[in-house]
Structure formats: structure tokens, C-alpha cells
Image (tube, rainbow, N blue to C red):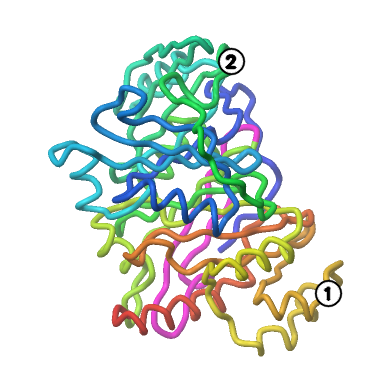
Amino acid sequence: METSTLDTVTTTTDFLPLNGTDHLEFFVGNAKQSAYYYQVAWGYKLVAYAGPETGVRDRASYVLQQDKIRLVLTTSLDPNSDITRHHAQHGDGVKFLSLWVDDATASFNETVKRGAKPYMEPTTFEDENGTVVISGIYTYGETVHKFVERKNYNGPFLPGYVVPANAMEVTPVGLKYVDHCVGNVELGKMNEWVSFYEDVMGFKLLLTFDDKDISTEYSALMSKVVSNGNGYIKFPINEPADGKKKSQIEEYLDFYHGAGVQHIAVETYDIIHTVGELRKRGVDFLYVPETYYDDVLDRVGHIDEDLDALKKLNVLIDRDESGYLLQIFTKPVEDRPTLFFEIIQRKGAKSFGKGNFKALFESIEREQAHRGNL
């Protein structure tokens, strides 16, 4: 069942102050072509590059930015590298959920002291634009949290990256920042990772959803949402629950071959414009039947937007005690049925669309059935 509060989480002493999401780095099979997709379809601007032309011999990385969202797409140039192995096992997916901090050394020391497995000791990187300190710890699966301290840096991204000479002109679709990132973990592991975020990173449990909240006739999942002290970082953690057929979480775990980032929710201030643009550019979204809209206003009450416009775009609506939200989910953006994106506009609501779970779950099950994976 849902917890009783949706208020912004606060802690008396936040030993791990986080300023927000610094960047999300994907390991992909072809970073150049992936970067083209995110520029043309999503309106991200190519702002930085590192590769053989900049003295990096084993990889190529493209940095894409739209407002406060940074995506880094990295591909291996070495068949024997860990990037190559990671991609062979998982396909295209998120390797680094990097967090913006004021002190990467203290962030590392405090979390390791509390039980985090070190990924990267605090390391200083420097070029003519200043210095950046980066450290890192492991989380679920092979996912890593990097702590990025960039207060003494004014370059395009990080030392070693350059501004591309031939970046194409793009038209943004109105994406603003990362709202939350969702992780899928194995059966029985959800509480373990919730405890990790509570004990190691000082997060607090914000919401709980059980298999009665998120289920259909055929499948179900369990989910808990953790948030850091100032509420800037929110991580829902999902695990499968018993059902008659294979759940979306099980399908993800089968094809990703382990735990990992399931979806990234990105905020817009005008979802009608954003989704309209994305649809024009060929981005595919999950389908919810038109009957969803027959009584949706009876459930959520007054909204500012035109219902017909939302219905045409298949945008969903939900409300909590703080307001309402508008949301829509893409189909998987990789060849494997793994990672996807959520577009969300919050009109006061602090929750995650509980009233839409059943409709979304049924929509995902239809896609699973098309793939032969239900």
C-alpha cells in the first residue's frame, strides 16, 4: 500500500548533500549513431566529445545536453575492454548514474564508511578549463554512482572533452531535468537495495507500492521509492511479484541479464508540445485505449489542459493531495526490451501516477505479447 506522506523528504543532518543529477552515461554499440538519434528525435545538442581525435584511444564518448539533462553515450574501440564486455551482456544501457556534489572526496568517504563498495577512489582531472574531482561506488547490478565535483571547472563537460566542431543545429522538445530514475532488481532484492540507499546514502523511504497497487490479471510487481535529503534525487526500485505470466520486470531482467536502470523520467513544463514534437520525429509511445479517457476527469478532477489534446497524444493523468501530473511512457528505445523513457509534467503532484499503473501495466503486457515474452 502507499505510504501516508508525499512531502519532500528532509533529514536533520544530510551527510551526503546532492545538488542533482550530473549526467547519465550509457554504454552503447555505436555512440555516433546513438547520438544522432538523440539529436534528431529528442532535440539534444551535442556539446562535447572525447575519442581518438582528443587522445582517448579505447573509446569514443558523445555528450548531449538539453537544459539540465546530460546524456553521455560511450562506445568501445577495444574488443577486449570492460565496455565491450558490458555491452555484450547488457546491450545498450545506463552504466553511470552520476550525481552532482560539492565534495566528491567526502561523498566517497562517507558512503564507503557506511558499507558502499568502492568503484573509483577520488581522482582529480585537470585541463586548461580547471579541475574536476570524481569518485564512485557500486549500486544494483553493474550500475555505478559517480560523485562529480565540478565547482572549479568551466569547460564543456569534463577534462579531456572538447566542443565538437560540426555539431548540428537541433530544435529542443522542451525537456528540463531528470525527475527520477527507476531500477529493476531481482526477486527478493528490492528491500536489500532500499536498505542500501537508506543506510549507505542517507536516503529516506518515500513511497511503497505492493502487488495490489501494480498488477493485472496476469502479472505484478513491487516497488519502493527512496529520495535524498533535499528531494532532488528519487530512485524507485522495482522487483517482480508472483503472477500467472511473466512481468515486465522479469522480461527486463531476462534481456538485460541482470539488474539495471529500467527507465528515466524527464520533466517538461508543456507535455502537449513535447510529446507532439517527439511523435512527429518518430518516437514510439505505449498505447492506452481511448476508453481510459471516458471517466478520467471523474477520477482526477479539473485540469488546465484540453482533454482532447491529451487524448490525441495518449497522455495520462493522475492526482494526489498536492496537485496533478501528466505522464507518458515510450516503448523501449533499445533493440532489447529494456530501457525506456517517461515524459512527465508535474502540476503540483509529488507522486508517480499510481492511478495509471493498471492501464500502463496492461499496455506493457500488450507489447510483451507482441514480442512473445508474456
Give, as a three-letter code, the residue at label 1.
Answer: Asp
The residue wearing badge 1 is: 306
The N terminus lies in quadrant: bottom right
The C terminus lies in quadrant: bottom left
Residue closest to the far front: 166
Question: Toward which corner of the image does residue 72 lie, by quadrant?
Answer: top left
115 and 166: which one is in front? 166
Q: Secondary structure at mark 1?
A: loop
* x 71%, y 70%: residue: 317
**Where's residue 89, x and y in %?**
20, 52
180 and 9: which one is in front? 180
Q: Secondary structure at mark 2?
A: loop
**Where's residue 177, x and y in %?**
63, 44
**Where's residue 340, x and y in %?**
46, 61
| Disc number placed over residue 151 in the picture, else none | 2
Magenta extent: 207-230
Q: Is residue 48 left or right of residue 8?
A: left
* x 44%, y 25%: residue: 161
